[in-house]
Each structure stands twice: as structure tokens, then as C-alpha cells.
Image (cartoon, rainbow, N blue to C red):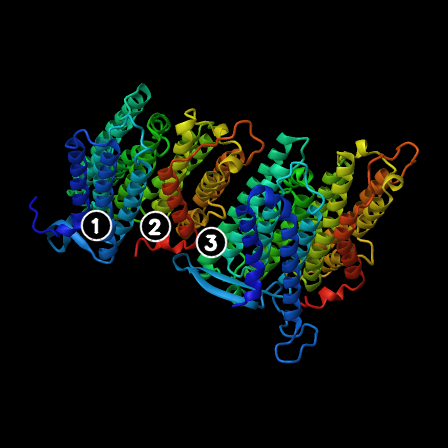
Amino acid sequence: MSTLLIALLAVPALTAMVLWVLPVSFADRVAAVVGSVISGLVLVGSVWLWIDYLRPADGPGTLVGFETAPRTLPGKLYPFAETDLEWIPPLDVRFHIAVDSISIPLIMLTALLVFLCCLYSLRITPRIGRTRSLIALLLVIETGVIGTFSAVDLVLFFLFFEVVLIPMWLVIDIWGDEHDAAGRRRAATTFVLMTVLGSAVMLLGFLLIHRQAGTFDLEVLGNNPVAGGRGVPLAAAILVALGLAVKMPLWPLHIWLPDAHAKAPTVGSVLLAGLLLKLGSYGLIRILLPVLPEATTTIAPYLGGFSTVAIIAGSLACFAQTDVKRLIAYSSVGHMGFIGLGIATMSPEGLSGALFANIAHGLITGLLFFLAGAIKDRHDTSDLRTIGRALNARLPRISGLLVFASLASLGLPGLAGFWGEMLALLGAYRPADSLPRTTFLVFMVIAGLGTVLTAAYFLRLIRNLCQGDPAEYPTTAFAVDLSRIELLTWTPLVALTVVLGLAPWLLLDYWNFV
Amino acid sequence: MTITWTDWQAIAVPLVLALGAVAALLVDGFWGAGSRQLKHLCVTLVTAGAILFGFAFLVTQRNSVRPGFCRAAVEAPAECSIVFEPLTVGLWAVLLIGGLGVVGLSTYGLLDREIPVGEYHFLLLSALTGATVLAGARDLATIVIALEVVSLPSFAMVALRRDRRGSEAALKAFLVSVLSTAVMLFGISYLYGVTGSLYLQTIATQLPGIDPDLRRVAFAAGLFVIVGFGFKIAAVPFHGWLPDTYAGAPVEVTAFLAVVSKSAGVAGLLVLVTFGVAPSGSELRTVVAILAAVTMTVGNLAALRQGEAVRLLAWSSIGQVGFLLAPLAVGDAQAVVGYLAAYVVVTLGAFGAVAVVQRHRPAGLLTDYRGMIRSEPGLAAALIFFLVVLAGLPPGLAGLFTKFAAFQSVIDADLLWLAVIMAVNVMIGLAVYLRWIAELFRLPAEAPFSVDIETPAVTVISAYTAAAIVVSVLPSTLFTLIT
């Protein structure tokens, strides 16, 4: 039993319940404060969990590098802070949670982003109000995401995976774009239906695994992977990969994503891009690779191929976007493509690249969506043509941050976005021995082109939005540049982007898959 | 046929239910001019007492096996007409929960004042008697008779409110039922001709070794019997009567049809499929699987287009039956009973909530529910929870895990195609319920529904919510109904 991990799961959900029980008028006023305090505590707890994990069990409290478990199988779980309880014996389902060096950084990212979203909501909320429910739903989403990252039982994974669906649907449906009621409802419904279909398909894969291996337990499955690259294991791998690819999303299953991101409120977009997409890539790393290694080898070239297409298609789509939120959404498709490619290489470099890009994308795209939301709030539209140019002159600080985030996102060395994509490409250069190297070399070249495209559309965005003659686009009288709450919310993201860019070993050291 | 021996405890529960039915009628008949409320209470207590006896019996006898109306067979275990065993325990538990739930929905102040209370409870208990017998029946004659004992009171209940819609609804259900009985009897006669027995156990042993020439006849006969049940449980394409009948009946009766009557049909089909006409490997199981796929798809798709709450529940109940048929097609009784139990609890709750709203807004449109999360937070939260369980998503874990069990049994039986169709239907089903949930959440509403909800309604809906929460936190209780 690990009380800390259970508390990380239970506290946000319980707080949400409490908020819903409180009277509306009172709760609306205190919701953001309560949410900030609670999610702040969760953040502290998750950092503590990480420190606890790094501290050797026997020695005094000094931090050392990761030496305890040499990994042979990428993604295999080495449980820490484990809780394993019987839950539904007739279905062979256990309440089994644990974390390791792959999941704790993601849990910290989750806690950080939810905390920042609550903080942001202290001052800036969607016009429709109902802050109480918004904060409560954000906290439920936090429970769901942390639960997914810490589930050891496949069914539990599926369960937490589904927990986030209805809250996210509500967030988009209720607090989404107020100018387009029909559009935001359609976006929300498309999101929830496609994801639920994906998770149902994933469940079919889990059940096939269970039929083959007789257990849902990832720890057991990690030690005795399902052998065979044909027949039932292959079917299971395809179903699991399909289900997770919807969530991730991988081209061509990404069609729910641009609308959902564009119509969601700022905090919704941040969590959607920063966290929910990671559930898909985390699932691929945690379940597909260690449980079905041989079947994954069979499908890895296809996974890599679709990822490469996603990189190119996502980048090209960005050129055609006139809506800043949609543009960032499509850029996510490209970035998740890099993560998919890294996973598909099944190599140590590719895997750690994918994991690093997960974290980096969460930070950078979170920041980008915060900025897009800020720009949208100030202009009451996210249409680039209506916003006009010369943001540099009108909102210099926000514009500067946008340039920073764009550079980080396009993979400027020295910032966090660089390492993940570089390692993914390196992985494609040297994929696992069982994979066809030529194919992956082609992928590498195409993905390399993708980085150029990424740079191109971000520079185009900067040129079209930030630069230009200030005389043509006069400052709006009431538009405030960077407010205090925005500064407070975004500083951690900026700082971490720089820190991880300069010191990637802070995370990479713990992902040795040799 | 000579009956040699019987264990009377095997039929103790149906017997007490039948006695309760007569008692309810007598109390009503001899009441005289006393307080209407007190009369209602007494009748309710009689009915509830009979049902609670059933629960007590199940709790004390849950591990025992008691055959009834048996006769010794040559070189085989005795052939029995009714058997009380773990499967029966599970099915009876579901049926009795359903019956008690309907009684709760029909307490004084909730039941339509036009409906005569004595007759209503008499019919309810009679149908429940038939349902319990059906779940324990092990020969075809008993099955047919029991099914009629369930069906006939149902039509009378539909028509209890004497208006045009009610009579039309009852007539429709009646005609379909007569037709289905005829079809079923036709099939049974052939089954008897082929195997020489009405006992399921003997039929099951005879069928595999049957003369190849007769195999097709046996298949057709089994098909007819299944089609007969298909009408009763409104499996597509035998579902035409259901939406109109549900919409025409009083809400309490609709709840009864959706819960007790439907569970009885499923129970009968389960007994039939697992013990008799469709042993594992039989092509008839494939037929049931196809029936499941078509039923869930059509039911859910049609539910997507409904604008009235009761009609939406009616069509979605067709979709739910499709999901029930999936584990039934592979003979997984545990998954069927678990699914049925979760379905019964939340359907009762949903109809309870609908009844509250319909009493004040008779149109029963989905838009009547707009903004209820603010104006009636308790009722709205309960209704949302029921709908989420029906959709099978968190926090409705009871629904999620019963759907999961259905998936598991289908996958373990190598029916991947059916599992994929089920996965698609999880999506369509979610879309159905989300439309309703969205209305509840939508703010601001022009004239949100807000009334003083009757105390009994608050009590029963709270009870259903509590039950749904318990089975959501501890889903294993659903699957241990069959020990």
C-alpha cells in the first residue's frame, strides 16, 4: 500500500465531490482557490513521489542516478509505490497501481498543468461562468489522467482512460467557444464518440491479451510477454494500437482533434493537448511494447509509417490554417507523429526520445494554448485574419512569449522541444535489430523534412502575427499586455522548457533501456 | 406422464407470490369505504411482503439445489420440470429486485389515481409468479405456460388506465404476443417430434446424436422457439410493438415492462439456450449472436432519433437487450445475470425520474429536462448517474463492468466480429445518452423543471441511486448473484 499515490488519485476526485455538494453561489467564488490549493498539493505530492523514487532504499537521503533496474524490455514496469488489492475476482480485475521512472514524470506534468489551469482560473474564466463545475471537472480529469499513468491492471488502465471522457466532453460542450454553440457541441461529441470507440477497440485488444496470457496484470505480463507475432497476439496488438492511436492521435485518426482543441476553452485545450494526448503515447510504451513485443515488431513499420505521414500531414495542414488554435492543434498532430515514430523504432534512443518529447510537448503546447487563449480573449476571435499583424507592437510581452514558445516547439536546440525529436530521429536511424532498417531510414529522412516544415510554419505564424507595421494595426485601447496571473501561470512552463532544454539528463538519465 | 416426486421448496417462492396476488386482490375487494391511502399502503405491504419472502428464501437457500416435479428416467438423471439451483437464484434475485422496484414506483401518490390499486398489484404479482416459474422451468410446456402467465397480466396492466392510447398499446402487445406464442408452440411441437421429449435436459442429450436428416428440422424448430422469445424480449426484427406500447402505458407499467417482463423473457431464453435447444457449438447460438448484433445496432440507432424520454428509453432498452443477447449467445449465464441486474436497477431509477417529470410535464420531451442540473440538482444527478451506467462509462462502473463481462465472454468464445459490433454500439449508445445528459446540463434554461418532488419518489429514487452506487463500487456483487 502506498498512501501517497492513492492520495494523489483520491484527493482531486474527492475535492470535486465536495465542490459539487457546496451551494452554487459560494462554491463558484471559492472553486478556483480550492482547486489551486488542492492541485498545488497534488503537485507537491507528485514531486515528493519522484524524490522518494530516486532516493535509494537503504542509504541516507542522497540523490543518486538510476541504477536499480537495468531495463531489457522497453516500457516494462518496475513497480514503485505499489498497491495491489483484489477488486472484482469474477472478472479477474485487481485494483493494482504502481509507478516507475516512466510514469512519475508524466504524473508531475499532469499535476503541474492542472495546477496552472486552476491558478489561471483564479482570474480568467470563460464568460459563461459556472466556475465550480469547471474546476471540479478539471480535478476529475486530473484523477483520471494520474490513474491512467499509474494503473498496472489493464482493465484499470481502461477504466481511468474512460474517466476523463465525460468531463472533457462537458468542458468543451459547456465552456467552449461561445460564438459557435453548434460547433462546440459537434466538436465535443465528435471527441467523445471517437475516443470511446477507440477505447472500446483497445478493450477488445486487452481481452485478447487476457485470453492469451490469462491475466490483466502488467507486472506479470511484463515478465512473461505474450509471444508470437501472428494470429491472436497480432490481432491484440493491432486493436490496442488502433485504440491508442485514436487518443494520441495518429493520422488518419486525428480528425476529432483540430475541432476539439479549437472549440475548447483555454484550460480545456491546455489539458487536452498537454495531457490527454499523452495517454495514447504512454499506453503504446507501457502496454504495446512490453506485453506484445513480437506482435509489435510486426506492426512497428506501419506505426512508423503512419507517424511519418502524421508529421508531414500535420505540418502541411498548419500552412492552411487561419485559426491560431487550430494551427497549434495541427502542430500537435505533427509532434505526436514524432513520438509515434520514436516508439515505432523500438530502440533505446527512440523510446527515450518519445518519452522526452511527451513531457516537452506537454509543456510547450500547454504554453502555446495558454498564449492562443490569451490572444483570443483579447481579440474575441482566434481568426488570424481578424486579429491582424504587428502583435509585437500591440502586445509586446505576449508576442515575445509566443515567439519563444514557437521556437521551442519547432525544436530549437537548447530548448526542451529539441531533444525528443532529435532522439526520435536518431532512433529511426538505428531501429531495433528486428525491424527493417531501410524503411526506418526513409522515415527518418521524411521526418527530417517534417522538422523543416515545422520550422517553416511556425516562422510563418510569427511573421504573420507578430511582425508587421504597427501603424496599420493600431493598439486596442483596453487590451492589456501580460497580466499578473498570466505571468505567474506561464513562468513555470517557460522555465521548465529552458531547464529541460539545457539539462535533458534530468529526465533522460532515468530512461536507460539498454 | 407420472410425477414421482417433488421438493415443494423448489416452488415456494412462486407459490407465495401467487398467494400474495390473491391476498392483494382480496384486501382491495373487501376494504369498503375506508381511507384510500391506507388501502394503498396495505396492498403495497402485502405485495412487498410476498416479494421480501422471496428474498429471504434466496438468502437462506442460495447454495442448495432443489428439483421439483421430477420423474425418474431410464439410465439418466431424473427429468424435472422446475429446478431451484444457483442459476435460478441469480435470475430470481433480478426478477424480485425488479418487482420490488416497480412496487416502490407505484406507492401512494406516485401511481396514477385512475389505476385500481388492487388489480394493479394482483397483476404485478401474477406476472412475477410467471416470471419466477419461467426462470426455474426446465421443460418446454412449463416454459410456455409460465411465459403466458407473465404476458397476460402485462397487457392488462398496460390497459389499466382506460384511455385510447393505453388500449391501443395493450392491443398491439397482445396481438404480437399471441403470434409469438403460436410461433413458439409450432417450434416446440417439432422439437418434440424430433427428440421425443419436452424436457430440456433430454432434448440437450438427444440433439447432438440426431438423425442427420432431422437435423435441419431440429434447427428450424429451435429457430421458431427462439423467434417466439425474440418477440417477447423485442429483439430486432420482432420489436415493432415495443415503442408504442411503452409510450402508451402509464410510466410505472412501462417500467414494469422494461424491467420484469423483459428480464423474464431473457431468463427464459437463457434457460432455453444453455440447457436445451442450443448446446455449445450449435448453429442456433450463431443465430442468437446475429440477433444480438442486429438488435443492439438498430435499437441504438433508432434511439438516437427520439425526442421523447420514454421513447428514448424504449429504443435504448432494445439496444440493451442486444447487449444482453451477446453473452447469452455464448451461454455465459454469469455475465447475463450480472448485466441484467445492473440494467434492472438503473432502468428502474431512470423510469422513476422520468415519472416525476412526466407527472408535471406530460409531453415528456427531452427538452423538458433542460437545465435541471441547477433547478433540481438531486434528481438530475441521479438521472445522469443512471444514464451513465446505461451507457457504461465511469462513474457508472456497474454498467461498465457488466458490458466488460459481456465483451469478455464474447471474446473468449472467439466471436471477434460480434465484439467489434459491440464496440461500435458502445459508441452509438453513448451518443444516445449524451443527448439527454447534455439537456440536463444546458444552462441557462427558459423554464427549468422545478417542483416539490413527492416524498415517496425521493425515497425510492434515492434507494435506486444508492443501489446503483453500491454495485458500481463493488461490481463483484453483480457477478456473485450466481454462486
Q: Are marks 1 and 3 in contact (CB under 8 Å)?
A: no
Label 1 or label 2, whichever lies nearer to me, is: 2
Q: Residues within 10 Å of mark 1 (few under 14, many from 20)?
A: some
The residues bearing labels 1 and 3 have C-alpha atoms spaced at a distance of 32 Å
Mark 2 is on which residue type?
Asp
Relative to A480, residue A426 above or below: below
Q: Is residue B152 visible?
A: yes
Name the kind of residue labelled 3 in the image.
Answer: Leu
Kindly state the secondary structure of the residue where label 3 is placed. helix
Q: Is disc 2 on the same chain as disc 1?
A: yes
Residue that numbered label 1 is attached to: B205
Q: Nearer the viewer, residue B483 or A316?
A: B483
Residue positioned 61% across, 77% down in the render? A57
Q: Chain of mark 3?
A: A
Disc number for residue B332: 2
Q: Is residue B113 above or below residue A106?
A: above
Label 2: few (<14), some (14–19) or many (≥20) C-alpha neighbours in 10 Å:
some
Residue type marked 1 = Thr
